[in-house]
Amino acid sequence: MLLFAHTGITLGTAKIMAGAAGWREKGLPAQLDYRLVLIGSMLPDLIDKPLGGVILPLGNGRIYSHTLLFLLTVLAVGLFFWFWKRKTWGLVLVGGTALHQILDFMWQDPQTFLWPLYGWGFPMGDAGVWLSMWLTNLIKPQVLIPELVGLLILAYGVRLE
């Protein structure tokens, strides 16, 4: 998935969850910072796409930050700041990151998701055609439909208050 699917669906999910939890968004602004939800929704791609596709020519944009280990590390940092400093930013960030990994169906790629349990390496792609393959995926229904759904959610007016 790409930008609109990750940001729109994650932001819409966060809004629904905040409403279901009974949070009054005006009364508890520190509880859910939607800017951090957006950052978390794209964090794995912001790290892995340049790292795996450009810096390390692996031809794979799903490496370190698409792992369960990364998610647990961000969770540990978030819990540390919650328990010792009463700051919620880390938990909000890990929520967005978790939704990113769910939307990417990372459990279907155990060699990456459960890294390093299956070895220290990541699946290799063809670095020469990585970008063109990524652009070609835009027309596949499993990518195009979530992108359109995310765009509709964003266009509907999910506001970052």
Image (cartoon, rainbow, N blue to C red):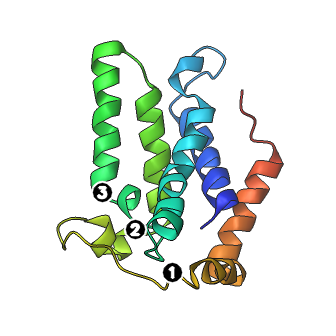
Calculate the distance from the C-alpha at mark 2 to the C-alpha at mark 1: 21 Å
Label 2: which residue? 106
Do labels 1 and 3 touch, CB within 8 Å? no
Amino acid found under the numbered disc labelled 3 = Leu
Q: Is residue 150 found left or right of 124 in the rendered image?
A: right
The x, y position of residue 71, in whole percent, is: 34, 49
Q: Which mark is residue 112?
A: none
> Above or below — where is 40 with respect to 36?
below
Q: Amino acid at mark 1?
A: Ala
Q: In this picture, is 124 found above or below 55?
A: below
Tell me how many marks there are.
3
Mark 2 is surrounded, within 10 Å at the Cα level, by few (under 14), some (14 to 19) or many (20 or more) other residues, namely: some
Task: Write the residue at 66% across / 17% down.
Answer: 26
Is 145 on the left-hand or right-hand side of 48?
right
Q: CA distance from mark 3 to mark 2?
A: 9 Å
Residue beneath disc 1: 127
Mark sitting earlier along the chain (1/3): 3
**Is residue 15 or residue 115 the one in the foreground?**
115
Q: Is residue 129 left or right of residue 108?
A: right
